[in-house]
Image (spheres, helix red, strand yellow):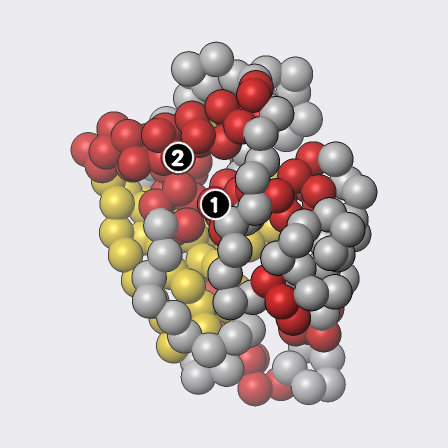
Amino acid sequence: MAASLAWSYSALTSFETCPRRHYLTRIAKKVVEPESEAIKWGNRVHAAMEAYLLFGTDLPAGMEQFAALAGKIKAKGAEPDASIEAERKVCLNDSYKPVTYFAKDAWVRGVLDLSVKKRSKLFVGDWKTGKPKPASDQLKLFAALAMETDPEVEEVVTAFIWLQPGTLTIDRFTREDLPGIWQEFIPRVARLQHAVTADKFPPRPSGLCRNWCPVGKHNCDYCGG
């Protein structure tokens, strides 16, 4: 597949939710997505967790309830033969080879909130500050990115870390799963690439259009704002 653009899980799902909104907010950048309070809170939590895990910084006021779960993860990273990383940026070209994050031939990018490696096994966690939801294919992509980036890794345990209830949604992947994971994503990415090539981003109306879409009625007939 020709690498005509670099994508990420969030970009792909943004396009699939509504091509018009995706184009205006992420490609043409004619519309700025408002930063909700939930997003601001999530960004603060990510930064605090990174500082706690890597530098031993105490969690700030309002996040003390996350300390027990974060402490268990930090202890795993401190075990012999283990290493821990936070907010790790990974990127592959269309041959599934690791490249720098902003390389000219970048094809797919991802940011791993948390990764703990111990020999050939890797734990990849994604902090979640909202209510638990059904498992997402986002974790599949993270597992594939991790294995393609590090040839030593044979097994990846992925988890959504739901901080409010203090629970995890866990899945496991091995190298045998890699072809199937990419086959799931390639058709979806092809549709995004076709839209970019054809410069066609039709709106996809939903129940969110009238009150929740930021693009404005002058950009889309379905938007009420």
Residue 31: percent from the left, percent from the top?
A: 78, 49
195 or 78: nearer the eye? 195
Which one is in front, 143 or 138? Answer: 138
Query: What amino acid does circle 2 point to?
Result: Arg
Q: Position of residue 208 (x, y in %)?
A: 56, 66
Local packing at callout 1 (Cα closer than 10 Å; few below 14, some 14-19, many 20+) is some
Position of 77 with respect to 185 (left or right) is right
Q: What crowding class fits label 2: few (fewer than 14 Cα within 10 Å), some (14-19), or many (20 or more)? A: some
Looking at the picture, tell me which residue is in the foreground, 141 or 113: 141
Identify the mark at residue 188; answer none if there is no mark: 2
Question: Could you tell me which residue is drawn at 50 percent across and 82 percent down?
Answer: 164
Residue at left offset 69%, top offset 65%: 224
**Contact check, label 1 and label 2, Cβ < 8 Å:** yes
Which residue is denoted by mark 1 in the rendering?
Answer: 16
Q: Is residue 75 left or right of residue 168?
A: right
Amino acid type for the residue under numbered disc 1 = Glu
**Residue 29 figure quarter:** top right
N-terminal of the pair, mark 1 or mark 2, is 1
Q: Residue at x 72, y 74 (%)?
A: 37
